[in-house]
Structures are given as structure tokens and as C-alpha cells.
Amino acid sequence: MLSSTVSSKILRAIALKEGFHFEETLTGFKWMGNRAKQLTDQQKTVLFAFEEAIGYMCSPVVLDKDGVSAAVITAEMSSWLATKNLSLSQQLKAIYDEYGYHITKASYFICHDPKTIKELFENLRNYDGKNTYPKSCGKFKVSGVRDLTTGYDSSQPDQKAVLPTSKSSQMITFTFANGGVATMRTSGTEPKIKYYAELCAPPGHSDPDQLKKELDELVSAIEEYFFQPEKNKLQPKTE
């Protein structure tokens, strides 16, 4: 099963417990579709792929997001759950109880100045001196950094990112000691700096309200310390 690197890590949590192979790709279904084709050519069975921005590939027949097949699968699942007196929301809660709650939040800032955007990301790469990434964000400790612009990944033995890198776009992912993950990246089509944040709780930590509160605090810290919207004159998303 596949997902893009800015999507929820719930599929990874399920894979770790159930034992199937899971991979992340870069953002966009072209990456997942191409990887699904490679795996299929290797006689692997690709069951599912999904993207944060609402796209699902429910079989390798169509190597792209396909709303028609996703709607059919959802209807089939709803019908099956109805035979057990369960709703879709009840099934989702059962998944969270089994594999841990995953609470997400995504938004963006608008910036029309490429120089400011580059400086913002370069400041993160030289946060506590040259070539040093942040060790914390407010009260939240950073446990890992992956920079797909430079190719750095602190989690790898050789500190080199596994996913393809591109110096023409900005993309940094921070992993936090509390189970949080946040990716900051530029848009390829709009003057936006996007962020995708998620708090991944282990099974048994079933207080979604507390998790949401903690995620909101993490996002506020990321906005204050990493984006610095007032200093960089960033325009927040209009609700």
C-alpha cells in the first residue's frame, strides 16, 4: 500500500501491526501511480494508495486517483458494515482504537516574494548555526528532520534521504518526540508555503479532544517559530 509523504501516517501504523508492505512517495498521484506500476511489474499486489488532498486508488486497474471506484468501494463497505449494525464513523473509531488516533491539520501562508521563501527555509537549515536544524519548536522537541531539497535525512544511517530530492522546490519534514509530524513545503503552482501536521498516538491513547488540543499547540508553535509570519510578512489563509 502507498501514500504520499504529506498524507496521514495511519496506513503506516496499520502496516506495522498487520505486516503488509507500505511505502511513501513524493506528493502527487503521478509518483504513486508510477511506483504502483513498478511494484506490479515485480509481481507485487498493490491494494491501495491515497493522497492527503482527497484521492484514492482502490486497485491497480487505474493507476491514478479514481473517484468512481472509490465511491463503489465505499458503498460496498457501507453495505457490509450495515449488516453488522455499524456506521462508517463507528468503523473509523474502531480503526483508531486498534491502531491509534491520527489527528491532522493542514493549511498555508501566502508569500509572493521568492527571496523571502528561500530565506525562510535557509533559516531552518541554519537554525542554531550553520547546517544545524531546529532541535525544538517551542516546548516540542524535534526528534528527526528530513529535507528533500538538500537530500538530508537524520533517520537514515548515511543521513541521505531515500525519496527523490529536488533543489528547485522547498520541502522539510520535522518529526517530534510527542508523535507529531509536520511537513513544510512550497507549492509548485501557487505563491503558497503549505504545512501538513499530524499527531500520531499509540493505541490506547483514546482522548481525541486532548490530542487535538496538543496538535493545535504544535501547529501554533510551528507558525510562530518556523514560519514567523510577522517577520516574513506572510499572509495567512483566509477562512
Image (cartoon, rainbow, N blue to C red):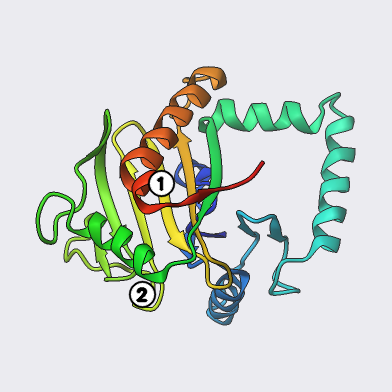
Give whichever of discs 1 and 2 has the lower sequence position.
Answer: 2
Tell how many labels: 2
Along the viewing direction, whichever of 41 and 139 lies nearer the viewer: 139
In contact (CB < 8 Å): disc 1 and disc 2: no
Left or right of 35? Residue 78 is right
On the question of residue 21 being in view, the answer is no
Question: Where is the N terminus found, in terms of image quarters?
Answer: bottom right
Q: Which residue is mark 2?
A: 165
Tell me residue 234's x, y (percent): 45, 52
Res 119 quadrant in image: bottom left
Q: Quadrant of the C terminus?
A: top right
Q: Residue shown at 36%/38% (left/top)? A: 224
Q: Residue furthest left?
A: 129
> x%, y% of residue 215?
46, 31
Tag in front: 1 or 2: 1
Q: Secondary structure at mark 1?
A: helix
Distance from disc 1 to disc 2, alpha carbons, whole Å, reads 26 Å
Picture quadrant where residue 180 is located = top left
Nearest the eye: 53 or 77: 53
Instruction: State whether residue 100 is above or below residue 235.
Output: above
In the picture shown, does residue 115 fall above or below 182? below
Along the line of sight, the residue nearer the viewer: 99 or 137: 137
Amino acid type indicated by mark 1 = Pro
Q: Amino acid at mark 2?
A: Thr
Picture coordinates of residue 191 (x, y %)?
A: 53, 66
Q: Could you say which disc has been placed on residue 229 in the image?
A: 1
**Residue 125 circle label:** none
Residue at 58% of width from left, 30% of height from top?
Answer: 96
Is 142 placed left or right of 183 in the picture?
left
Q: Position of residue 146 (x, y in %)?
A: 30, 58
